Image (cartoon, rainbow, N blue to C red):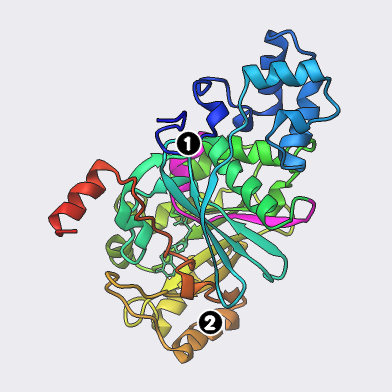
Amino acid sequence: MGGVGKAGWMREEDAGRAERPDLAGLERQELEALLRARGVEPFRAGQLYRWIFRRGVTDFERMTDLSKSLRASLRDGFAISIPRVAGRERSSDGTEKFLLELADGRRIESVFIPDTPGWTFCISTQVGCAMKCGFCLTGKMGLVRNLTAGEIVGQVRVLAAELGLLDARFTIVLMGMGEPLHNYDETMKALRIMGDPEGLAISPRRVTLSTVGVVPGIDRLAAEPYMPNLAISLHATTEAQRDLLVPLNRRHTIADVVEACRRFPLRRRSRITFEYVMLAGVNDSPEDARRLVRLLSGLRAKVNLIPLNEAAGIPFRRPSDGTVDEFGRILAEHHLTVSVRKSRGRDIRAACGQLIVEGPARSAGQRLAKAMEGG
Ligand code: SAH
């Protein structure tokens, strides 16, 4: 097989060395400990971090502030993995969707959104998603597996390098594929790696974690020293309505989620974002708007209205602009800060809820589903 790994992603020379510890998924202290155990001075961890995360270098040979012999022994002992860009599509509005292939051949999508007003990277935390929200395509895939911290940060490394933004200031939204609080430990580890001042140095204030409302996860997040901004995918104003749209609501109800938000410690001047996908005739009435005002009363909240991105297989419609405006007007009248999410990258299926991968690597469940529909 010519030295090529099973997913065809490894370089020839890397074959056979696949078990080398991967430096790309380690916090700096872990890297220090690993180096120390191999007789390398721990301060080298800072140098390695700068190469890997700040300069986007994965080839030890290019790490010119390390001695030749150290470079050689690092190369023999360790790997620095990075997801492979398997596809890249650019929308007419400048949004770019990256199809990334992981070491095991699984594929995920990450999206670059310019002019937000800055630059935003929308990053995945799982391959697929277990939440099965009724209007989301990713949910249709089911959960294939969690991403590792290295794979989560790897998306940021790839996008920054590909887009020439390694030195730029960008924000991160964990709003790609997956439910971040369903993959809590690896997600938080990824945020700590991204935050390291020797590396990408992304302050948690520039990171927003979006959750469908995993209450124990929200409570855990509340105690984190490294705390991102919080966004809640609410989408409904009555329990009955949300039960139908977001199956997790049967376990963690609107009341529970809002309660968890009330005890969530916010930094000065920061607020919780409530995302609200608007579905024509389902959750877009003036009564819904007024119920939403009551639900959020007393919370430091802002509301992000997301008119549905329609897709084949999604049994809902997008409301008219007039309906969206009227809904937003009622919220604003009651002193809620409202924004309407511009739909970005719809022409390349990179918009919210449109991330799905039908690559060659399917889970057993996906293969079965596909076989049953005769595809
Ligand atoms: N699982 C997390 C992170 C994903 S964020 C969460 O649910 O918050 C993706 C956002 O896009 C969520 O707010 C989701 O509800 C929304 N979304 C999903 N499908 C959509 C669609 N078809 N149109 C518009 N927004 C959608």
Q: Quadrant of residue 68?
A: top right
Q: Which residues are magenta?
A: 167-185
Which residue is located at x 27 percent, y 64 percent? 244
- Look at the image and say whether residue 357 sits in the magenta stretch: no
Q: Secondary structure at mark 2?
A: helix
Q: Is residue 307 above or below residue 190?
A: below
Of the numbered discs in the image, which one, if any, rests on residue 103? 1
- Quadrant of the rendered structure where residue 284 is? bottom left
Judging depth in this view, the residue of 125 and 88 nearest the camera is 88
The residue that label 2 is drawn on is 328
Q: Determine whether 28 is above or below 266 in the image.
A: above
Residue occupying the far right of the picture: 65
Mark 2 and mark 1: span between their CA atoms? 44 Å
Asked whether 233 or 161 is in front, the reply is 161
CB atoms of marks 2 and 1 within 8 Å: no
Residue 184 visible, this angle? yes
Viewer can see residue 42: no
Disc 1 secondary structure class:
loop
> Residue 19's spot in the image, x, y percent?
51, 20
| Residue toward you, 112 or 279 | 112
